[in-house]
Amino acid sequence: MPHKFNITILGMGSLGQLYAASLSKTGYDVCGINSRGAVPRVSLMTPQGIQKHTLTTNLPEQFDLLIVTTKAYQAVRAVKNYARHIGPKTTILLLHNGMGTLAPLKKRFPDSSFWLGTSSHGALAEHGVLRHTGKGETWLGFAYGDRDSEKEAWATEALNHALPPAKFTSEILSKLWLKLAINSVINPLTALHQCKNGELSAPRFNNEIKALCDEFSLLAIAEGLDLSPELIESTVYQVIKNTAENHSSMNRDISASRTTENDQISGYVVSRAAHFGVAVPTHSKLFETLCRLERRQNGNILP
Ligand code: PAF
């Protein structure tokens, strides 16, 4: 039953393109939107050569499932731009890195439902061609609004066909916080030192990574989540190993003098820690250093 619900992807960076191409390839009608509007096709590199996947450019009157894959700092404004397509039937799935977008969005769209998700797929879009650089998984979970078990089952099945594995879980917060832990270690360090993810396994980073993981665990406990320092540290090192040849998204943003997700990653850690009175000095220092670096870069590109 591929056409039971309409699917729209908001944010056609690498991850958005990967989900759009995979869903389209499996026979689902999917609409993909970037900052200029609906995107007609995605070109995917496969071992057999480049495959072009056509997307539908007709926006549904009301979105059934809106998957948000923009940068975290663009998400709230981007969703609000499509307010006329969002109603009580709409489920908004927040599938971006970083945190902090659910609260303002559910305030603006109280009649819609929200799911949270996290993806560990690797994708790289270069010169208009997308490459699926690392097989990962998708976790989805309910966050707010009316529950629709039919839509939950349908979306899980659609994503499982298109880009397996995908699972619905009641533990989505733990998954998101573990992803936040990974991002709050790998992204700022690789951005600051302009290195590949794999270089963080060098002994000179050991102490800082351990301190970041220990502090993060204290914060997670304050949030009511059982994420031990050992689990966080071993997961971080696993991701460093699995993505050794990759440049993190924040590394790329700094290298291209673009806005980073520092506010939605380290900034979120620092503000939640302040809320609970948990000391996170290593995260705070990294956050401030990145803020200064970004300000300097932005200053540099002004006339
Ligand atoms: O933001 C990223 O680049 C990725 O989430 C991760 C896991 C750090 C791998 O590069």
Image (cartoon, helix red, strand yellow):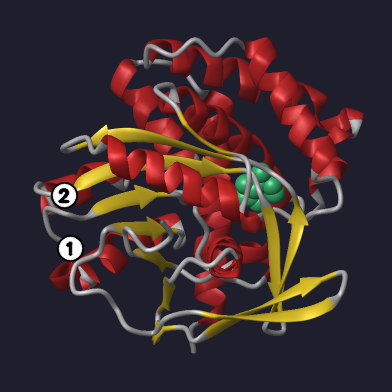
Dot 1 crowding, Cα within 10 Å, few <14, some 14–19, many 20+: many
Task: Name the residue type under label 1.
Answer: Ile
Q: Which residue is mark 2?
A: 112
Does the beta carbon of the residue at mark 2 sit less than 8 Å from ligand 1? no
Does residue 61 lie above or below 189 as drawn?
below
State the image quarter where residue 14 is shown.
Answer: bottom right
The residue lying at 29 percent from left, 78 percent from top is 59
Earlier sequence position, callout 1 versus callout 2: 1
User: Would you say 210 lies left or right of 35 here?
Assistant: right
Q: Which residue is mark 1?
A: 86
Image quadrant holding the N terminus, namely bottom left
Disc 2 secondary structure class: loop
Disc 1 secondary structure class: loop
Q: Is label 1 in contact with label 2 (beta carbons under 8 Å)?
A: yes
Dot 2 crowding, Cα within 10 Å, few <14, some 14–19, many 20+: some
Does residue 100 lie above or below 53 as drawn?
above
